[in-house]
């Protein structure tokens, strides 16, 4: 019996650069196979070849032993290979059932006139949603679902046309912790229904827990490990980080000053016994996979949630936040996952930038519009934010939105900045801007608490990293060779 | 002399005179006109000059005039200075190449205990009263209109030094041609230094991107870090990130 899916010696070159060189992979029926590859190593090229959008220079793609015609996305779909991209391809104004049955609506005829049998569609959808334990109804408009739920709807749509193999690009990117966990268990259930998965990613994330086998796209070839044991994963991570090594990050050696933020035996529902001291000019990382409690630390310190035991000192004084509004005025918070945690999305750039520090633009009790305009224009220029200051935040690109978020804390002149996945979803160019802004802040003596699940980023930018797992701090790592690998071993080992 | 030397000499003459004549060059070097034409063809292919009837003209857009370096204390320059100074740590041994802001970088690091090697006389001047810094000046000929010394360095002395960080100016930064400098002699002295440096840091102002100057200093993937004065083209940011090269770009927060 042939393998379900095979990539046979795929080679592809662009402009004389050999991106893929006889890359080969096999996938078995009912397997969840994770293919990891750093950005820029040819993962996207491979994905385009598999989906039929690109004809490879050499090599073939086989499904159940049969060679698939290259450059024919329709043929791929017909044979049962469905590709799910990073961007969600659903119609946001339509409901779940409408999206799932798009183009394949069940039809009936009444007196010779054909019509769509929505009742049957709805029933089938309802059954599928129930089988996977999804808490929404078929009539929910897709725009009301979380990103993770939208992803799952896309997958259900593929399964409803009996997809044999689902190729998913960056499945858990943009997902919150909760969604990520639901999503991975959803994929396992789908596997139980007979669908096989090829998951493409640039960082393991929590996919290691559901992978049957893992491969890495490294130096134009694919290396497959027969399993998903920890030692294979550590190996993959080392290879991933050797591509985008700590050298890629603009780290500055900064002398640290006195302690600005200290936590002692802090306990909350998501973590226990957290203690640390953060200094002026220091970048302290908190590393953790979804579920480790790392992200909760940021939210709790900023006051978005409560802690039960222990204490926190800000700038030497005991700190008890009662609400986010009363968050310490020397502390700021930037979230890459939920920007609306600290931004007013319906308002414009100028409004958001000056919000935390209205004193700078007040004229008695009245708002000095000219001062607001001058301050926001000046800061926009200096941070190189593309959009006009009058633009509503909803119109900004991810990178510019993040810069506006940083700018408000610069205006507020905070001494401590808590970052929660600050570069999530951003491309290399935009991320470099953010890293350089962080470096400038640190040069000015600001303390940074850098919470992230991107271990290369933490290894690149942080002076020290606390590694969390299941609510506990398991490691405390200083700058060293293979720091990203060490962080990984702590976070999942 | 070899073809390469002859071609370099032709570029020097072009730099001085802006145009050259095939007949004159043929007499000067004692080779046939055919040979000269071949040299000019090669240099034209490399983007260094434009052939004309009977000779060649300098390609102005790749030659960055030394005179064009004004003493501009713009905030972009200060950003570059700030980042370079921040990269220097106590007890480092650093090489500061010739650059308009080298002198300001020197001023910013004056207080630290360091060894500084330089071929820029303004840097040496700036550091002459710094009590904690050992200053080594290399090079012997002062290039007219600049603060830069070239030629005549003591190889034995150099080889005894260990240089932790080298800050080198770029006159051209290009994805195809790499890091280039306008003066072949400067290239010579800087290459010597770089071969003994642990960390290469290239000072690349925005205006030098996508430009190619005369002399190839190094491939674009060679340096460990780049310091720019302001935002640079996206494709370069991606290149540096993908090749483990730290890109430092200033943001003026205050």
Image: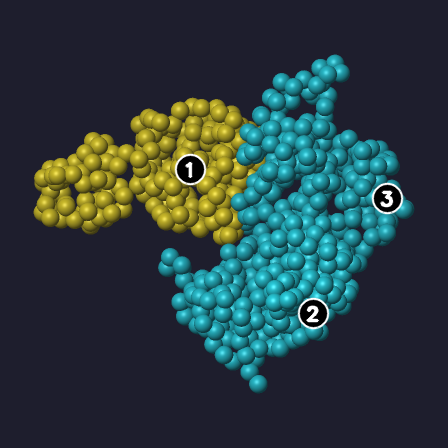
Chain colours: A cyan, B yellow
Q: Position of residue B132 (x, y in %)?
A: 56, 32
- Provide the secondary structure element on which disc 3 rests: loop
Q: Nearer the viewer, mark 1 or mark 3?
A: 3
In whole angstroms, how far apart are the C-alphas of marks 1 and 2? 57 Å
Query: Label 1 belongs to which residue?
Result: B169
State the image quarter where residue A169 is shown: bottom right
Q: Position of residue B74 (x, y in %)?
A: 49, 25
How far is the residue under mark 2 from the one under mark 3?
Answer: 37 Å
User: Which residue bears the numbered disc 2?
Assistant: A190
Q: Residues within 10 Å of mark 2 (few under 14, many from 20)?
A: many
For image coordinates 71% across by 44% down, the residue present is A338
Q: Is residue A272 above or below residue A187?
A: above
Estimate how packed mark 1 is, as few (under 14), some (14 to 19) or many (20 or more) residues with alpha carbons within 10 Å. Answer: many
Residue occupying image coordinates x 41% and y 29%: B121
Q: Which mark is residue A306?
A: 3
Residue A367 position in % (x across, y down): 70, 19
In-front residue for pair A340/B148: A340
Res. B164 visible in picture: no
């Amino acid at each position: 019996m042939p393998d379900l899916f095979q990539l046979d010696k795929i080679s592809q070159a662009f402009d004389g650069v050999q991106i893929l060189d006889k890359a080969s992979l096999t996938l078995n029926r009912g397997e969840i196979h994770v293919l990891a590859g750093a950005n820029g190593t040819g993962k996207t090229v491979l994905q385009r070849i598999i989906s039929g959008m690109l004809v490879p220079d050499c090599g073939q793609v086989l499904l159940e032993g049969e060679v698939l015609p290259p450059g024919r996305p329709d043929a791929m779909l017909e044979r049962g290979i469905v590709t799910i991209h990073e961007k969600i391809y659903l119609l946001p104004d339509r409901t779940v059932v409408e999206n799932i049955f798009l183009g394949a609506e069940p039809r009936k005829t009444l007196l010779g006139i054909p019509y769509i049998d929505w009742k049957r569609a709805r029933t089938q959808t309802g059954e599928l949603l129930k089988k996977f334990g999804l808490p929404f109804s078929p009539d929910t408009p897709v725009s009301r679902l979380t990103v993770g739920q939208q992803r799952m709807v896309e997958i259900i749509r593929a399964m409803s046309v009996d997809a044999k193999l689902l190729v998913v690009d960056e499945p858990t990117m943009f997902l919150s912790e909760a969604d990520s966990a639901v999503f991975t268990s959803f994929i396992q259930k789908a596997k139980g229904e007979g669908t096989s998965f090829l998951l493409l990613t640039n960082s393991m994330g929590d996919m290691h827990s559901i992978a049957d086998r893992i491969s890495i796209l490294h130096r134009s070839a694919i290396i497959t490990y027969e399993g998903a044991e920890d030692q294979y994963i550590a190996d993959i991570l080392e290879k991933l980080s050797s591509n985008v090594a700590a050298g890629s990050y603009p780290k500055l050696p900064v002398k640290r000053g006195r302690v600005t933020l200290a936590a002692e035996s802090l306990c909350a529902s998501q973590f226990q016994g957290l203690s640390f001291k953060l200094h002026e000019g220091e970048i302290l990382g908190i590393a953790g996979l979804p579920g480790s409690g790392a992200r909760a630390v940021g939210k709790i310190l900023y006051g978005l949630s409560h802690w039960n035991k222990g204490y926190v000192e800000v700038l030497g004084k005991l700190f008890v936040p009662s609400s986010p509004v009363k968050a310490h005025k020397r502390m700021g918070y930037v979230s890459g996952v939920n920007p609306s945690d600290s931004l007013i999305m319906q308002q414009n750039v100028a409004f958001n930038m000056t919000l935390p520090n209205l004193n700078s633009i007040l004229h008695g009790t009245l708002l000095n519009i000219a001062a607001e305009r001058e301050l926001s224009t000046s800061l926009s220029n200096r941070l190189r934010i593309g959009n006009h200051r009058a633009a509503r935040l909803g119109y900004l690109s991810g990178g510019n939105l993040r810069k506006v978020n940083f700018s408000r804390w610069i205006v507020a002149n905070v001494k401590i900045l808590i970052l929660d996945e600050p570069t999530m979803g951003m491309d290399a160019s935009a991320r470099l801007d953010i890293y350089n802004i962080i470096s400038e802040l640190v040069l000015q003596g600001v303390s940074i608490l850098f919470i992230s699940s991107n271990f290369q980023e933490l290894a690149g930018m942080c002076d020290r990293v606390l590694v969390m797992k299941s609510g506990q701090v398991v490691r405390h790592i200083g700058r060293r060779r293979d720091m990203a690998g060490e962080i990984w071993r702590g976070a999942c080992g | 002399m070899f073809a390469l030397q002859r071609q370099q000499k032709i570029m020097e003459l072009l730099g001085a005179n802006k145009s050259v004549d095939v007949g004159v060059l043929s007499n000067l070097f004692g080779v046939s006109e055919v040979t000269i034409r071949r040299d000019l063809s090669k240099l034209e292919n490399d983007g260094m000059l434009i052939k004309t009837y009977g000779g060649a003209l300098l390609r102005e857009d790749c030659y960055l005039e030394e005179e064009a370096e004004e003493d501009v204390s713009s905030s972009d320059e200060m950003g570059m200075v700030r980042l370079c100074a921040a990269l220097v740590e106590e007890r480092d041994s650093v090489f500061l190449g010739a650059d308009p802001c080298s002198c300001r970088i020197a001023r910013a690091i004056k207080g630290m205990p360091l060894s500084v090697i330089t071929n820029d006389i303004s840097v040496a001047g700036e550091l002459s009263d710094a009590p904690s810094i050992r200053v080594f000046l290399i090079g012997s000929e002062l290039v007219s209109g600049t603060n830069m010394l070239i030629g005549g360095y003591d190889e034995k002395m150099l080889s005894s030094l260990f240089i932790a960080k080298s800050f080198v100016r770029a006159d051209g930064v290009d994805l195809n041609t790499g890091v280039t400098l306008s003066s072949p002699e400067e290239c010579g002295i800087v290459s010597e230094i770089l071969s003994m440096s642990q960390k290469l840091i290239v000072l690349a102002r925005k205006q030098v991107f996508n430009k190619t100057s005369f002399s190839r200093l190094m491939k674009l993937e060679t340096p460990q870090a780049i310091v720019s004065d302001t935002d640079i083209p996206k494709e370069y940011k991606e290149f540096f990130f993908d090749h483990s090269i730290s890109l430092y770009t200033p943001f003026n927060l205050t």
